[in-house]
Image: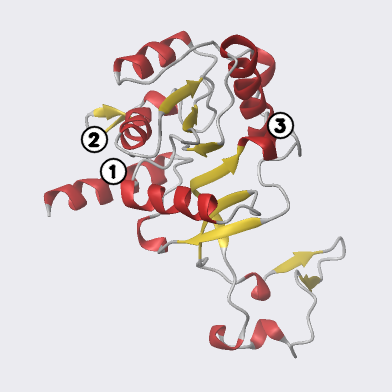
Amino acid sequence: MEETIAIVPARGGSKSIPKKNIKDFCDKPLIAYSIEVAQACPSITRTIVSTDSEEIAEIAKSYGAEVPFIRPKEFAQDATLDYPVFRHCLEWLRDNENSIPEMVVQLRPTSPIRDVETIERGIAMLRDHPTADCVRAICEPSQNPYKMWTLNKEGYVEPLIKTNIHEQYNQPRQALPVVYWQNGYLDVIRAKTILEKGSMSGDAVMGLVLSPDYVFDIDNDMTFEFAELYYKRKIDK
């Protein structure tokens, strides 16, 4: 059977919320939720945390994750993208374990409210479509980009998207094309997309459409508190 692993990227530094990835979220470190849901997925064979922090590494291991290496500082900067982090992890597995999985599931700690069924759907979608490079979780945005503007130096606004729709910014939402944004809930990527195409998405990206009602991407105190409130109400039902 083709191996599917989960990689949880968890950098030690965080400007918006200090030690965000291990901050207490409903009585557990934030990162614990991504680890636990990965371990509950039948299709995921390993859960690896990539971190530059010894403290995060110890907490991750206490929840059952593997931390086979400490991420080099060069891949843990404020401007570091996902790609070098994931490439480093896959190359480490190749060079040290002679192992390369077929698929990688990216689970960001900042999206703690997930369910096994949705993750399994994403994995199955990529497995069932061999020409796809990646499956990315998406949902409809609260604001439609067809109603967005750019602001020039003179103070005038121009439509962000140029279309043939007459004054699309004055049209009702129902008259505009349906659009989606990538919400960070889940990405399932073929390892060869990362290693051979040098990309976290590749050319053929499939969309796993989710409801925006339970998609949370924690990046500040307000979204952290709101996600906690939602989670507490969810488990109290």
User: Quick one: SS at disc 2?
Assistant: loop
Q: Which residue is mark 2?
A: 26
Classify residue 8 as left or right of residue 81. Answer: left
Q: Are marks 1 and 2 in contact (CB under 8 Å)?
A: yes
Q: Position of residue 194 (x, y in %)?
A: 68, 35
Q: Is residue 222 above or below residue 131?
A: above
User: Which residue is found at the position 80% from the left and 76% from the top?
Assistant: 162
In the foreground, 80 or 17: 80
Q: Position of residue 208 (x, y in %)?
A: 50, 59
- Which residue is the extreme one toward the left? 237
Q: Residues within 10 Å of mark 2 (few under 14, many from 20)?
A: few
The quarter of the displayed image where residue 87 is located: top right
Q: Is residue 200 above or below residue 121?
A: above
Q: Position of residue 117 (x, y in %)?
A: 33, 51
Classify residue 154 as left or right of residue 84. Answer: right
Q: Which residue is mark 3?
A: 195
User: Quick one: SS at disc 3?
Assistant: helix
Which image quarter holds the C terminus?
bottom left
Q: CA distance from mark 1 to mark 2?
A: 6 Å
Q: Which mark is residue 80?
A: none
Q: Which residue is mark 1?
A: 228
Classify residue 6 as left or right of residue 36. Answer: right
Q: CA distance from mark 2 to mark 3?
A: 37 Å
Q: Is residue 183 visible?
A: no
User: Which residue is found at the position 67% from the left and 75% from the top?
Assistant: 146
In the foreground, 74 or 123: 123
